[in-house]
């Protein structure tokens, strides 16, 4: 595996030892690669096409590390369902940071590669189905144009892992702009206070600036600029989630990346019928992380981020609180601006006009009342010609609703008041996906893959790679699941 385009650096490893612990991947009995992302490998500058299957299997289970690797587990903390705890990579290893041919830098991380100092008694391994799920959903999000970690490979280890029973073990190779989280800043703040070493927090904040917000270096208040940058990216990210009906599922602070990427695909899913109260996580019994709660939770997480940065935000506590408050107070407006921009685009509306917000809100209320399919409703609105209910499953009741007919006339009148009205269907199809990773399709493909049949999964990945082309898939990929609760589980 010498050469092959590997260019691993280790800037994170240069941080103080409090932030990481060296570790090695566990042995794998019979490794085999199930999925390999050729396109992503090329983007990273990796030339692995001529490798033997056995060599790839050894590589992607950690039996033979890429040249220049220095595997380590990262330390971080997090508020999980509102409760603070010290955490860390209990089953993940950062191999290093790969520089791409065009100069970008990405973390290369194994997930499910064995125990570390942060495993807290766990086996540090991962089950196959959740790793395949992360591969599918992260790549689907990338195809939708949403900032996300990505998946380079999934390999089975040949070992069983014990959950509710024995299931196949697997390792996911994850690619990220970095794995810095709000929880990493929280960890640094606690360590700095407990060890009476304020430089720990500053070193991490400086690293985050260098890695993701270099423009903050020259700001009058660099750490406020850092917080502002994080807030803006989160506002835009959550707006993008809502625009495609995505529910993250577990927006703990350790699952909120400072880079503004979507990270950690556990009990996530896409909504079928529009309902802001939709919850997928089996343990989210009170709807903390429901679809419609995601903006509020992002604001809550940002408040925890600001608390961690307080020692750096002002010369005294009052100044620091004022600085943090100014950033946090602006988040709601930033999110609303990003969300309304996305919603107008979904409706084919050009420059904002008075009444646009009410028009969008009225449609969503009608969709909620009729339990209309979120994705298919916007696709049907953007169709070139009237279509039968069967062509857009889950929309029939809405389009037969007399109140909707009145709304549609108002919408058409609004379109007529803008230039290039004939381009509206074309622009709508460019932002409204025809296909998403629907829960029923994902689960069916995962079940088959765990049983050894990868064909349904490969077909699903092929369709999701071109989500704005309705002609690339048959109707089954656009059909919502029958009404009823759907639950996903934290992937282990």
Image (cartoon, rainbow, N blue to C red):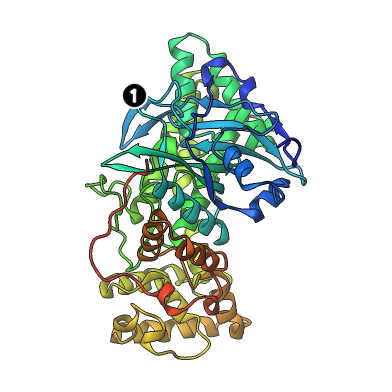
Observer able to see residue 258: yes
**Residue found at x 47% / y 9%:** 195
**Picture layout, residue 364 above or below residue 300:** below
Residue lying furthest top: 196
Q: How many marks?
A: 1
Q: Is mark 1 on a helix, strand or loop?
A: loop
Say which of 33 and 133 sits in front.
33
Indicate the position of residue 394 as horizontal and vertical percent values: 33, 77
Indicate the position of residue 96 as horizontal and vertical percent values: 63, 31
Q: Quadrant of the C terminus?
A: top left
Say which of 392 and 354 sits in front.
392
**Residue found at x 34% / y 28%:** 84
Observer able to see residue 321: no
Circle 1 Cα neighbour tier, 10 Å, few/some/many (<14 / 14–19 / ≥20): few
* Location of mark 1 (residue): 121
**Picture layout, residue 172 above or below residue 93:** below
**Residue found at x 30% / y 39%:** 163
Indicate the position of residue 151 as horizontal and vertical percent values: 55, 48
In the rendered structure, the answer to whether residue 38 lies left or right of residue 165 reads right
Image-quadrant location for residue 127: top left
Indicate the position of residue 347 as horizontal and vertical percent values: 49, 74
């Amino acid at each position: 595996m010498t050469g092959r385009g590997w260019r691993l650096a280790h800037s994170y490893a240069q941080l103080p030892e409090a932030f990481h612990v060296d570790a090695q991947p566990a042995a794998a009995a019979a490794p085999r690669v199930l999925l390999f992302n050729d396109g992503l490998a090329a983007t990273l500058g990796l030339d692995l096409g001529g490798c033997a299957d056995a060599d790839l299997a050894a590589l992607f289970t950690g039996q033979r590390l890429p040249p220049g690797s220095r595997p380590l587990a990262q330390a971080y903390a997090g508020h999980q369902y509102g409760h603070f705890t010290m955490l860390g990579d209990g089953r993940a290893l950062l191999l290093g940071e790969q520089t791409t041919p065009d100069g970008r830098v990405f973390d290369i991380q194994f997930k499910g590669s064995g125990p570390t100092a942060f495993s807290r008694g766990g086996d540090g391994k991962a089950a196959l189905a959740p790793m395949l799920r992360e591969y599918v959903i992260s790549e689907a999000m990338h195809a939708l144009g949403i900032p996300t970690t990505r998946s380079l490979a999934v390999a089975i280890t040949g070992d069983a892992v014990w959950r509710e029973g024995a299931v196949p073990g697997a390792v996911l190779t994850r690619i990220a702009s970095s794995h810095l989280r709000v929880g990493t800043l929280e960890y640094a703040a606690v360590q700095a206070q407990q060890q009476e070493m304020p430089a720990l927090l500053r070193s991490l904040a400086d690293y985050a600036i260098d890695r993701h917000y270099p423009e903050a270096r020259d700001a009058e208040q660099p750490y406020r600029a850092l917080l502002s940058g994080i807030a803006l990216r989160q506002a835009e990210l959550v707006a993008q989630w809502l625009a495609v009906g995505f529910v993250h599922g577990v927006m703990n602070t350790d699952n909120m990346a400072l880079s503004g990427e979507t990270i950690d695909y556990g009990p996530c899913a896409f909504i079928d019928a529009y309902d802001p109260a939709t919850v997928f996580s089996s343990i989210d019994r009170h709807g903390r992380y429901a679809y419609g709660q995601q903006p509020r939770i992002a604001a809550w997480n940002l408040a925890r981020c600001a608390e961690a940065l307080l020692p750096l935000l002002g010369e005294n506590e009052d100044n620091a609180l004022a600085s943090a408050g100014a950033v946090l107070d602006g988040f709601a407006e930033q999110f609303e601006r990003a969300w309304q921009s996305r919603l107008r685009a979904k409706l084919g509306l050009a420059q904002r006009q008075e009444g646009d917000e009410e028009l969008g809100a009225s449609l969503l209320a009608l969709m909620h009342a009729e339990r209309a399919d979120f994705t298919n409703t916007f696709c049907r609105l953007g169709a070139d010609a009237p279509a039968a209910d069967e062509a857009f499953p889950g929309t029939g009741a809405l389009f037969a609703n007399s109140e909707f007919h009145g709304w549609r006339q108002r919408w058409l009148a609004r379109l007529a008041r803008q230039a290039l009205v004939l381009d509206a269907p074309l622009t709508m199809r460019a932002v409204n996906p025809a296909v998403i990773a629907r829960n029923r399709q994902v689960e069916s493909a995962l079940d088959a893959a765990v049983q050894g049949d990868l064909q349904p999964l490969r077909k699903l990945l092929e369709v999701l790679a071109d989500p704005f082309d309705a002609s690339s898939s048959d109707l089954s990929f656009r059909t919502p699941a029958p009404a009823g609760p759907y639950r996903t589980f934290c992937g282990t």
